[in-house]
Image (tube, rainbow, N blue to C red):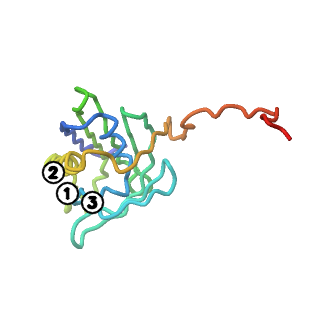
Amino acid sequence: MPGASAQSVEEAIEVAVPVHTAYNQWTQFKTFPRFMRWVKGVEQLRPNLTRWEIGTGWATWTLMAEVVEQHPDELIAWQGLGRWAGHRGEVEFRALAPNRTRIVVRLRSLARPTRRHLLHRSPVTPRLIRAELARFKQFIEGVGQESGAWRGVIRKGQVRPQEEKPARSLVAGWPVG
Protein backbone atom coordinates (compact mmCIF):
# COMPACT_ATOMS: atom_id res chain seq x y z
CA MET A 1 0.00 0.00 0.00
CA PRO A 2 1.75 3.23 -1.11
CA GLY A 3 2.34 5.79 1.61
CA ALA A 4 1.49 3.42 4.44
CA SER A 5 3.80 2.64 7.34
CA ALA A 6 3.79 -0.53 9.40
CA GLN A 7 3.98 -0.64 13.18
CA SER A 8 4.89 -3.96 14.81
CA VAL A 9 4.93 -5.01 18.44
CA GLU A 10 6.09 -8.33 19.87
CA GLU A 11 6.03 -9.15 23.57
CA ALA A 12 6.29 -12.40 25.52
CA ILE A 13 5.63 -13.61 29.05
CA GLU A 14 5.93 -16.89 30.94
CA VAL A 15 3.04 -18.08 33.07
CA ALA A 16 3.07 -20.82 35.71
CA VAL A 17 0.18 -22.89 34.32
CA PRO A 18 0.01 -25.72 31.76
CA VAL A 19 -0.23 -24.69 28.10
CA HIS A 20 -3.83 -25.95 27.80
CA THR A 21 -4.89 -23.81 30.78
CA ALA A 22 -3.33 -20.64 29.34
CA TYR A 23 -4.75 -21.33 25.87
CA ASN A 24 -8.23 -22.25 27.13
CA GLN A 25 -8.47 -19.04 29.17
CA TRP A 26 -7.30 -16.96 26.21
CA THR A 27 -10.20 -18.36 24.12
CA GLN A 28 -12.65 -16.87 26.64
CA PHE A 29 -12.69 -13.41 25.05
CA LYS A 30 -15.63 -12.19 27.17
CA THR A 31 -13.45 -12.44 30.30
CA PHE A 32 -10.77 -10.07 28.95
CA PRO A 33 -12.25 -6.97 30.66
CA ARG A 34 -11.67 -8.72 34.02
CA PHE A 35 -7.90 -8.55 33.62
CA MET A 36 -7.08 -6.27 30.67
CA ARG A 37 -7.32 -2.56 31.41
CA TRP A 38 -7.73 -1.48 27.75
CA VAL A 39 -10.48 -3.99 26.92
CA LYS A 40 -13.90 -2.67 27.91
CA GLY A 41 -16.00 -5.46 26.39
CA VAL A 42 -15.97 -8.28 23.88
CA GLU A 43 -18.93 -9.74 22.03
CA GLN A 44 -18.47 -13.11 20.34
CA LEU A 45 -20.67 -12.87 17.24
CA ARG A 46 -19.55 -16.22 15.74
CA PRO A 47 -16.70 -18.61 16.61
CA ASN A 48 -14.44 -16.64 14.26
CA LEU A 49 -15.92 -13.11 14.58
CA THR A 50 -15.69 -10.73 17.55
CA ARG A 51 -16.54 -7.11 18.34
CA TRP A 52 -14.20 -5.40 20.81
CA GLU A 53 -14.62 -2.16 22.76
CA ILE A 54 -11.12 -0.94 23.55
CA GLY A 55 -9.67 2.20 25.08
CA THR A 56 -9.56 4.08 28.33
CA GLY A 57 -11.59 6.93 29.73
CA TRP A 58 -13.29 8.92 27.00
CA ALA A 59 -11.08 7.48 24.23
CA THR A 60 -12.72 4.21 23.15
CA TRP A 61 -12.93 2.41 19.82
CA THR A 62 -14.94 -0.46 18.41
CA LEU A 63 -12.87 -3.07 16.62
CA MET A 64 -14.26 -5.93 14.55
CA ALA A 65 -11.87 -8.86 14.28
CA GLU A 66 -11.94 -12.17 12.44
CA VAL A 67 -9.98 -15.14 13.77
CA VAL A 68 -8.22 -16.53 10.70
CA GLU A 69 -6.13 -19.30 12.31
CA GLN A 70 -6.71 -21.12 15.57
CA HIS A 71 -4.99 -24.32 16.66
CA PRO A 72 -5.58 -25.57 20.24
CA ASP A 73 -2.63 -25.05 22.59
CA GLU A 74 -0.59 -23.41 19.80
CA LEU A 75 -1.94 -20.31 18.08
CA ILE A 76 -4.75 -17.78 17.68
CA ALA A 77 -4.32 -15.33 14.76
CA TRP A 78 -6.72 -12.58 13.71
CA GLN A 79 -7.19 -9.69 11.34
CA GLY A 80 -9.12 -6.50 11.82
CA LEU A 81 -12.14 -5.78 9.63
CA GLY A 82 -13.58 -2.55 8.24
CA ARG A 83 -11.56 0.52 9.16
CA TRP A 84 -9.24 -1.76 11.16
CA ALA A 85 -8.43 -3.90 8.09
CA GLY A 86 -4.70 -3.18 8.37
CA HIS A 87 -4.52 -4.64 11.89
CA ARG A 88 -3.19 -8.20 12.31
CA GLY A 89 -2.20 -10.12 15.39
CA GLU A 90 -1.40 -13.50 16.82
CA VAL A 91 -0.89 -15.14 20.16
CA GLU A 92 1.42 -18.14 20.26
CA PHE A 93 1.48 -20.64 23.14
CA ARG A 94 4.52 -22.86 23.88
CA ALA A 95 4.78 -25.43 26.65
CA LEU A 96 8.09 -24.97 28.47
CA ALA A 97 7.38 -27.53 31.20
CA PRO A 98 4.27 -29.32 32.49
CA ASN A 99 3.23 -26.20 34.47
CA ARG A 100 4.98 -23.45 32.54
CA THR A 101 3.90 -21.73 29.30
CA ARG A 102 5.44 -19.01 27.16
CA ILE A 103 2.90 -16.68 25.53
CA VAL A 104 4.06 -14.50 22.63
CA VAL A 105 1.84 -11.69 21.32
CA ARG A 106 2.59 -10.17 17.93
CA LEU A 107 0.65 -7.19 16.58
CA ARG A 108 1.09 -5.47 13.26
CA SER A 109 -0.84 -2.52 11.95
CA LEU A 110 -0.56 -0.92 8.58
CA ALA A 111 -1.41 2.70 9.25
CA ARG A 112 -2.37 5.04 6.45
CA PRO A 113 -0.66 8.37 7.08
CA THR A 114 -3.56 10.79 7.46
CA ARG A 115 -3.57 14.10 9.27
CA ARG A 116 -5.46 12.49 12.14
CA HIS A 117 -2.88 9.67 12.26
CA LEU A 118 0.00 12.15 12.44
CA LEU A 119 -1.64 13.96 15.34
CA HIS A 120 -2.63 10.82 17.22
CA ARG A 121 -0.19 8.00 17.80
CA SER A 122 -1.44 4.43 18.13
CA PRO A 123 -2.05 3.41 21.76
CA VAL A 124 -0.61 -0.05 21.01
CA THR A 125 2.94 0.07 22.37
CA PRO A 126 5.29 -2.59 23.70
CA ARG A 127 4.80 -1.15 27.19
CA LEU A 128 1.01 -1.46 26.94
CA ILE A 129 1.18 -5.06 25.67
CA ARG A 130 3.66 -5.97 28.46
CA ALA A 131 1.31 -4.50 31.06
CA GLU A 132 -1.74 -6.34 29.67
CA LEU A 133 0.21 -9.63 29.55
CA ALA A 134 1.31 -9.09 33.16
CA ARG A 135 -2.35 -8.70 34.16
CA PHE A 136 -3.22 -11.92 32.29
CA LYS A 137 -0.38 -13.70 34.14
CA GLN A 138 -1.62 -12.43 37.51
CA PHE A 139 -5.18 -13.47 36.66
CA ILE A 140 -4.48 -17.01 35.38
CA GLU A 141 -1.89 -17.83 38.05
CA GLY A 142 -4.18 -16.45 40.76
CA VAL A 143 -7.14 -18.54 39.64
CA GLY A 144 -5.00 -21.53 38.62
CA GLN A 145 -7.50 -22.85 36.11
CA GLU A 146 -9.40 -21.66 33.06
CA SER A 147 -12.96 -20.35 33.28
CA GLY A 148 -13.91 -22.15 30.05
CA ALA A 149 -12.52 -23.28 26.73
CA TRP A 150 -13.14 -23.33 23.02
CA ARG A 151 -11.06 -26.09 21.42
CA GLY A 152 -12.16 -25.65 17.83
CA VAL A 153 -9.86 -25.23 14.86
CA ILE A 154 -9.99 -22.36 12.38
CA ARG A 155 -8.03 -22.48 9.12
CA LYS A 156 -8.00 -19.61 6.64
CA GLY A 157 -11.01 -18.10 8.44
CA GLN A 158 -13.10 -21.30 8.19
CA VAL A 159 -14.29 -22.97 11.40
CA ARG A 160 -13.54 -26.69 11.39
CA PRO A 161 -15.51 -29.25 13.40
CA GLN A 162 -14.05 -29.96 16.82
CA GLU A 163 -14.20 -33.70 16.23
CA GLU A 164 -15.83 -35.98 13.76
CA LYS A 165 -19.12 -37.45 14.98
CA PRO A 166 -19.46 -41.18 14.38
CA ALA A 167 -22.16 -42.24 11.93
CA ARG A 168 -25.37 -43.24 13.66
CA SER A 169 -26.35 -46.87 13.25
CA LEU A 170 -29.62 -47.60 11.49
CA VAL A 171 -29.98 -50.85 13.45
CA ALA A 172 -32.09 -50.59 16.58
CA GLY A 173 -30.28 -51.13 19.87
CA TRP A 174 -31.20 -53.96 22.24
CA PRO A 175 -33.57 -54.56 23.88
CA VAL A 176 -36.17 -53.90 21.21
CA GLY A 177 -39.56 -54.26 22.06
Q: Which residue is at the front of the view, 107 or 91?
A: 91
The Cα atoms of the two marked residues, 3 and 1, are separated by 26 Å
Q: Which residue is at the front of the view, 109 or 126?
A: 126
Residue picked out by circle 1: 121
Which amino acid type is marked by label 2? Ala
Q: Please report whichever mark, 3 or 1, sits nearer to the chain's N-terminal start.
A: 3
Q: Which mark is residue 34?
A: 3
Q: Which residue is at the front of the view, 153 or 11?
A: 153
Which amino acid type is marked by label 1? Arg
Q: Is residue 169 left or right of residue 116?
A: right
Task: Give the mark toward the camera: 3 or 1.
Answer: 3
The Cα atoms of the two marked residues, 2 and 3, are separated by 14 Å
Residues tagged 2 and 1 counted as in contact (Cβ below 8 A): no
Label 1 secondary element: loop
Q: Quadrant of the C terminus?
A: top right
- The mark tally for this picture is 3
Label 2 secondary element: helix
Residues tagged 2 and 3 counted as in contact (Cβ below 8 A): no
The Cα atoms of the two marked residues, 2 and 1, are separated by 18 Å
Q: Residues within 10 Å of mark 1 (few under 14, many from 20)?
A: few
Location of residue 150 with respect to 81 vertically, above or below: above
Residue picked out by circle 2: 131
Q: In the displayed image of the protein, which residue is found farthest to the right?
A: 177
Q: Which residue is at the front of the view, 73 or 3?
A: 73
Q: Where in the figure is residue 166, as x and y percent of width and height?
A: 67, 31
Q: Where in the figure is residue 141, as x and y percent of width and height?
A: 20, 45
Which amino acid type is marked by label 3? Arg
